[in-house]
């Protein structure tokens, strides 16, 4: 009896360990990258740079996925363009510029900081600042001490007593 | 001053409504990207023709404005715009050139054999590299290129009669005059 209980306990503990591992496995599978083995460069350093660049480039067909994640044909083409450029000896910046020259800033998942995007980059911080300033002003204007409460007069006290007693009765 | 502050939420609301109205206006497609290639030199290309002999190249097309249409037999919207391309070629005598994007020659030939061939020449862009150079992100796309080889206009998606009559043809007339 005792040994049986022990075994069940051990069994459930194993399951408890396996469950998250399987769950994590599924998560990783869902995030499997679209880069195909045939696309990879033989040079691991170049390939790593290509992957890093690809992660920051938007797939223009799906529009909310990076080309590193997307299975679209166009994403494949741009991945190959990035690798051709890197293999030819271009720097990361030159490679990214080559893609931007064709598709515009929109292809960058992280938009550049320039006058046209100031609102985008600094807007949230500005809104937060305005909000904090508003709270500061409000706190400052609020009277520091709460006025002392005026004591109840005779009539009010009687009425209160009556109400209290009603509740009890 | 105090009173005016109460109007602030209403004002913010109107701004938001304004943005929504802008995005909901008829004919607006948030997926359409502005081309960064406008008024830039078209990327050079030299493609084998569908007919098998010679090539279609940008250099050979320079000298007069041309319209270049990226299409594919596997592309459904291309079939929608196809009758319009036939009209452009036959009635409006537009110098229309096709680039078969990632389309085997046999398939492109079969399409043009069945529906008619509006193109003065068709280049084969089998691996899509010329499309990539142009910044094509889907077919069909149509480019107007002037006599000096600069891209003047890009149309994403199938052409419509309104676009042809109000944008494409007037632009070509203007380019032809200058």
Image (spheres, coloured by chain):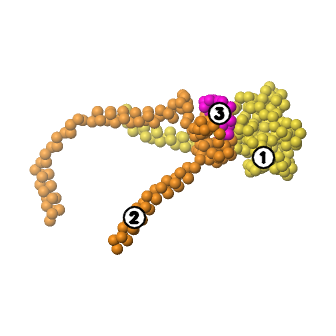
Q: Which of the 4 image quadrants contains residue A144? A: top left
Residue B68 in view in this figure: yes
| Secondary element at image label 1 | loop
Q: Specify the colour of chain B.
A: yellow
Res. A10 mark: 2
Res. B103 mark: 1
Residue A35 falls left or right of residue B40 = left
User: Where does label 3 land, which residue?
Assistant: A86
**Chain letter, disc 3 residue:** A
Counting residues from the start of the chain, the first of labels 2 and 3 encountered is 2
Residues shaded magenta: A78-97
Q: Specify the colour of chain A.
A: orange
Depth check: give the residue in front, A55 or A123: A55
Q: Position of residue A37 (x, y in %)?
A: 65, 46
Q: Position of residue B58 (x, y in %)?
A: 80, 32
| Secondary element at image label 3 | helix
Depth check: give the residue in front, A54 or B26: A54
Depth check: give the residue in front, B159 or B22: B159
| Secondary element at image label 2 | helix
**Chain letter, disc 1 residue:** B
Q: Measure the alpha-carbon separation of dots 3 and 1.
A: 28 Å
Crowd class of label 1 (few under 14; some 14 to 19; many from 20; radius 10 Å): many
Q: Measure the alpha-carbon separation of dots 2 and 3.
A: 54 Å
Mark 2 vs mark 3, foreground winner is: 2
């Amino acid at each position: 009896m005792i040994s049986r209980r022990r075994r069940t306990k051990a069994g459930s503990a194993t399951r408890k360990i396996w469950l998250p591992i399987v769950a994590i496995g599924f998560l990783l599978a869902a995030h499997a990258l679209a880069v195909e083995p045939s696309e990879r460069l033989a040079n691991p350093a170049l390939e790593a740079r290509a992957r890093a660049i690809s992660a920051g480039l938007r797939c223009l067909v799906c529009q909310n996925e990076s080309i590193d994640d997307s299975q679209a044909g166009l994403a494949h083409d741009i991945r190959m363009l990035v690798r051709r450029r890197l293999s030819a000896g271009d720097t990361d910046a030159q490679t990214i510029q080559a893609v931007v020259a064709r598709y515009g800033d929109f292809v960058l998942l992280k938009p550049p900081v320039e006058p046209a995007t100031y609102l985008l980059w600094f807007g949230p911080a500005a809104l937060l600042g305005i909000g904090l300033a508003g709270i500061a002003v409000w706190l400052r204007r609020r009277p520091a001490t709460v006025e002392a409460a005026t004591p109840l007069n005779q009539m009010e006290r009687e009425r209160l007593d009556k109400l209290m007693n009603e509740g009890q009765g | 001053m105090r009173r005016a502050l109460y109007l602030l939420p209403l004002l913010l609301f109107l701004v938001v409504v304004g943005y929504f109205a802008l995005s909901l206006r008829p004919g607006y497609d948030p997926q359409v990207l502005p081309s960064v290639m406008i008024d830039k030199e078209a990327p050079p290309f030299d493609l084998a023709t569908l007919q098998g002999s010679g090539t279609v190249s940008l250099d050979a097309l320079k000298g007069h404005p041309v319209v270049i249409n990226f299409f594919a037999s596997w592309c459904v919207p291309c079939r929608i715009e196809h009758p319009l391309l036939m009209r452009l070629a036959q009635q409006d005598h537009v110098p229309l050139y096709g680039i078969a994007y990632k389309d085997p020659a046999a398939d492109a030939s079969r399409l043009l054999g069945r529906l008619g061939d509006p193109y003065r020449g068709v280049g084969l862009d089998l691996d899509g590299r010329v499309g990539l150079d142009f910044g094509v992100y889907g077919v069909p796309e149509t480019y107007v290129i002037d006599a000096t080889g600069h891209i003047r206009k890009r149309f994403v998606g199938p052409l419509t009669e309104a676009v042809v009559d109000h944008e494409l043809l007037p632009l070509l007339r203007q380019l032809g005059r200058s």
